[in-house]
Amino acid sequence: MSWGQVAGAGSHANLWIFFTASVAGFLCWFLGETVLYSRLFSYFHGPTGTLELLPTMSAVYFLQIVNSYVASGAFLLFLHARKRVPWIMGGCTLMFQGYLDATLLAGLSLIAIAVVPSSPIRLGLVYAVGVLGAGCIIASFFLLWGARLPAGNWLRWIYDRPSMTSFRTARPAQYMKLYALRFLIVIGAGFALYGQFRSFHIGVPLMQTLALTPFIVAVGNSPFSPGGIGTTQLVFTLAFARFAGKDDLFALSLAVTAFNLVVRIPMGLAMGAPLATEVVEVESQFAPRRSVGQL
């Protein structure tokens, strides 16, 4: 595969379809996650409106250019500055949502394997079963039997940690609502991906696209590459290899990565001022402590 072949594959794409599908997918992610995290924070740290969270979400999406761990720092800053949530407790709340995401994606992967047995995602069957099993054990611990353990038990010590309030106080109805919101986001991302394939004349069936979407979402959100660069290309060229040539798949993956980068940069520039205000507010909390220590 040469760069000339990649450029040739890209030149035949329908850019209007690609742009429409990409914008729809991005809005699905951005608006969907704004609602999702506003619900998450409202459940455990006080009422949080979607408009209140928009500047922070913009900062999160901009910082995802670096990686997802750095982006999570914007959430922690928001929780600490606006909701007075301790840093570790805020981190555990984000961990709770990550736990829900992992179990949902594992469950969707198992459904995809059952519905579309020929999907390449079948290779991850054992991992999906393991993640879902571990998720069920964690849920049962916090919902059913963790509070019944004796005070000296080390598991009871974990259960009682103040920072674990989201795990400890979450109710089944809240689990279901957060699962439902993430499910809608993933399905929307699957349809957007199908449109992107069509724009490059790649004939991946809709069911195959939806079946592989949980895996693509999981890899795309991994913290191991900035902005998904590299991992996106790897997933596209391997997972969909039987539906198109490497040049077409690589060209599409580059277009997807480029779009994701271009659309995030203006968000960071626009939301730099609100984020800086919160940083100054947090900095002012530590200033008196330093002054006392210097006396």
Image (cartoon, rainbow, N blue to C red):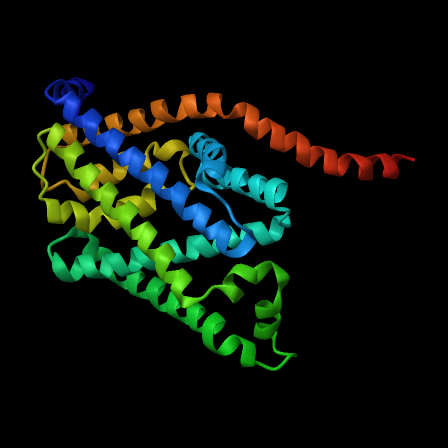
Image quadrant occupied by the N terminus: top left
Decide if residue 183 is in sight here.
yes
Q: Residue at x 21, y 37 (%)?
A: 192
Q: Position of residue 43 (x, y in %)?
A: 49, 56
Residue 125 image point, x, y percent = 24, 61
Residue visible at 67% across and 33% down in the picture: 281
- State left or right for residue 13 relative to residue 187: left
Question: Relative to the observer, which residue lies in front, 33 or 263?
Answer: 33
Q: Position of residue 224 (x, y in %)?
A: 42, 40
Left or right: residue 59 versus residue 11 is right
Residue 61 sits above or below residue 32 on the image? above
The mark total stands at 0
Q: Nearer the viewer, residue 215 or 191?
A: 191
Against 234, residue 130 (above or below) is below
Tell me the quarter of the image containing the C terminus. top right
x 57%, y 44%: residue: 79
Residue 102 visible in the displayed image: no
Name the residue at the right extreme.
295
Q: Report which quarter residue 92 is drawn in.
A: bottom right
The picture places residue 44, in percent across and down from the top left corner, at: 53, 56
Is residue 260 positioned above or below 99 on the image?
Answer: above
**Quadrant in which residue 171 is drawn:** bottom left
Q: Which of 94 and 119 is in front in this view?
A: 94
